[in-house]
Amino acid sequence: MFSGGSLERFSIFAIGIMPYISSSIIVQLASEIIPSLKALKKEGEAGRKIITKYTRYGTVLLAILQSFGVATFVYQQGVVVTSSLEFHISTVVCLVTGTMFLMWLGEQITERGIGNGISLIITAGIVSGIPSGIVRLLTLTEQGSMSMLMAVSIVIGILLLIYAVVYFESAQRKVPVHYAKRQFGSGMMPGQSIHMPFKLNMAGVIPPIFASSIILFPSTLLGWFGSNSTNSILHKVAAMLQHGQPLYIVLFATTIIFFCYFYTALVFSPKEMAENLKKSGAFVPGIRPGEQTSRYLEKVVLRLTLFGALYITTICLIPEFLTTALNVPFYLGGTSLLILVVVTMDFRTQINSYVMSSQYEDLMSRPDMKSLSRK
C-alpha cells in the first residue's frame, strides 16, 4: 500500500519504510510501560537520541524478519535458480539495506529539510501509484469491465472525500485565554485576550499508518507461511485479514480509535499546559488556574479526540465499503487518501512558514532596517 509498487517490481525498497513505523510503534508503547524508557523521555534531547537508537535497532530486527519472509515466499514459487542459502542471504541484505536507506533519508529530511521525512517518503510512494491507477481505470472502462457511470462516480467520490478531509483537517476548537495586566519595565502591559486553537484531528495521519502497519505485517507473514496449503489455519486467518473482510474492518477501526487517543496522550499534556498558563499569568475565563484548568483542557481534548477518531475511521472505511458494494475490481485506499491530503496540507503550511521566515530575514538584513534596529 505504501511502497508505490516496489514489492511488485521486487526492488531494493520492496518492504519500504514499514519496519521503521512498526518499530516506532513498539518503542512508543514500551516507553509508556517500561519505567526506564519512560525516564528517558523526560531527559530531553539526550533521552530522545537513545530512544531513536532503540528504534533503529528495532527497525533492523523487523526488517530482517520481514525480508526473510519475502525471500521464503519467493523461493517457494520455484523461480529461483540459485541455492536457498545464497538467495536468502542476498535478499535479506538487499531489502534490509533498502529499508535502512529510507530510514536514514527520512531522518535527514526531517532534520535538514521541510516536513516530516518519513511521512513524505510514504506520500511519495502513494503518489507514484496514482498514474498506474488512472491508466487501469481507463483500461477497465475501455474494455467494458466497468461502466462509464461507475468510473465517473468513483472520481467524484474521491474528490468529495478529499474535500471532506481538507474541511475537517482545517477545523479548530478555539479556547479563549486571557492575560492579566503585567509589569513590563517601568510601564504596565494591559491585559489581552487570545485563543488557543486545538485541531479536531490532533493525531494527524499517525493512527491510520500505525493501524495499517499493525494489521498488514502479521497478515502478510501469515499469508506467506500459510501459502503451502489453502486449508491451513494460517492461510484462513490471513484471508480473514484481507481488505473488505469483516474481521479486518473491525480490527482496523478499533486500532485507529486506539491510536488516536494514544498518540494524542503522547503529544499533549493538559497538566503541563495548565502550569505554563499559570506561570505566564494567563487563565481561561470562568476556570480557576491550575488543576481546574488542566481538567477543563483534558475534557476539551478528549471530546475533540472522540470526534477526530470517528472522522478518521469514517474516511478510511468509506472506500472499503464502496469497493465491496460497487464490486470495484481494484482497491481504493482511504488510508492512502488521508495520508496524501494531510501530509500535503502540512507540507504546504511548513513551506509558507519557511517563506515567511525567509522574507523576514531578508527584510531585517536591509541596511535601513539595521540602522532602525540600532536606534
Image (cartoon, rainbow, N blue to C red):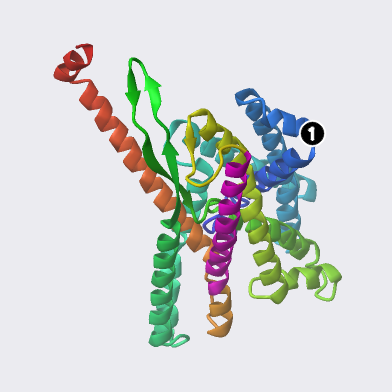
- Residue drawn at (75%, 65%) of the image: 223
Residue 316: quarter of image: bottom right
Q: Quadrant of the N terminus?
A: bottom right
- Residue drawn at (21%, 26%) of the image: 363
Q: Quadrant of the C terminus?
A: top left
Residue 213 location in percent, x, y? 65, 55
Q: Which residue is mark 1?
A: 35
- Residue drawn at (74%, 41%) of the image: 32
Tell me if 303 is positioned left or right of 258 in this view: left
Tell me where the magenta segment starts and ends, as one range. Answer: 291-319
Residue 50 visible to an observer of this rendering = yes
Between 153 and 96, the one nearer to me in the picture: 153
Between 234 and 213, the one nearer to me in the picture: 213
Residue 218 location in percent, x, y? 74, 59
Secondary structure of the residue carrying tag 1 is helix
Please tell me how crowded label 1 is: few (under 14), some (14-19), or many (20+) other residues with Cα within 10 Å. few
Between 219 and 369, the one nearer to me in the picture: 369
Q: Is residue 356 above or below residue 88?
A: above
User: Does the magenta run of residues contain 137?
Assistant: no
Tell me if 159 is positioned left or right of 321 in this view: left
Residue 307 location in percent, x, y? 55, 63
Task: Give the dominant element type of the magenta stretch: helix, strand or loop.
Answer: helix
Q: Amino acid at mark 1?
A: Pro
Q: Residue furthest top?
A: 374
User: Does the magenta run of residues contain 305?
Assistant: yes
Q: Residue furthest left?
A: 368
Residue 12 visible to an observer of this rendering = no
Q: Is residue 337 above or below residue 125?
A: below
